[in-house]
Image (cartoon, rainbow, N blue to C red):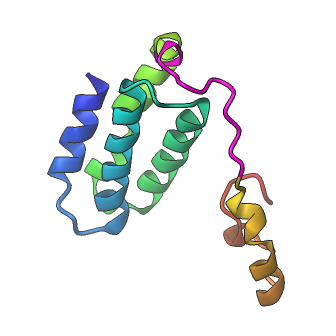
Amino acid sequence: MARNFTHFFAHESCGFCTPCRVGTSLLADMMDKLEAGKGSPQDFTEIQELNRHLFKLSHCGLGHSACNPALETIAKFRPAYERRLLHKNFVPAFDLDASLAPARALTQRDDAAAHLGDDHE
């Protein structure tokens, strides 16, 4: 059911703001991946991160609430999602934030806005 809601949000996005237009499509793809049994625990983290971006950057309530069905069902039925994971111990081999370190050094920026996650203060 959450997958159907994410596809609804992707379809109903007006396309005005890029975060909503792209974010809802990415969310629908992630939910398809999880339903197909090709997901990993990293997908849960990516959905939370996508929600943070959509909530912060979308212009309307559709973008602000697009991740709610996925987040709520993952929170309440996580074992059901985890049973469908293909790679239970997946660790990404590529760290984009670490790869951006040379660019931060070149621009002499190390503030929070120059990092991808909330981990940096």
Asked whether, in this view, residue 59 is left or right of residue 74, the answer is left
Q: Quadrant of the C terminus?
A: bottom right
Judging depth in this view, the residue of 8 and 52 nearest the camera is: 8
Q: Is 71 drawn above or below residue 10 in the view shown?
A: above
Q: Quadrant of the N terminus?
A: top left
Asked whether, in this view, residue 104 is left or right of residue 74, the answer is right
Asked whether, in this view, residue 107 is left or right of residue 32, the answer is right
Asked whether, in this view, residue 32 is left or right of residue 49, the answer is left
Magenta-colored stretch includes residue 72: no
Please tell me which residue is depicted at 34% across the width and 59% down the height of the picture. 22
Q: Quadrant of residue 65?
A: top left
Pick out the residue farthest to the bottom: 107
Pinpoint residue 119: horizontal percent, then vertical percent: 76, 52
Q: Quadrant of residue 4?
A: top left
Please tell me which residue is depicted at 42% across the width and 29% down the height of the picture. 34
Please tell me which residue is depicted at 72% across the width and 49% down the height of the picture. 93
Give the overall secondary structure of the magenta segment.
loop
Pinpoint residue 88: horizontal percent, then vertical percent: 63, 23
Q: Quadrant of residue 98?
A: bottom right
State whether residue 23 appears in this view: yes
State whether residue 66 appears in this view: no
Please tell me which residue is depicted at 60% across the width and 37% down the height of the picture. 42
Pinpoint residue 46: horizontal percent, then vertical percent: 54, 43
Q: State the extent of the magenta-drawn residues as a range.
A: 81-93
Q: Is 11 drawn above or below residue 115 in the view shown?
A: above
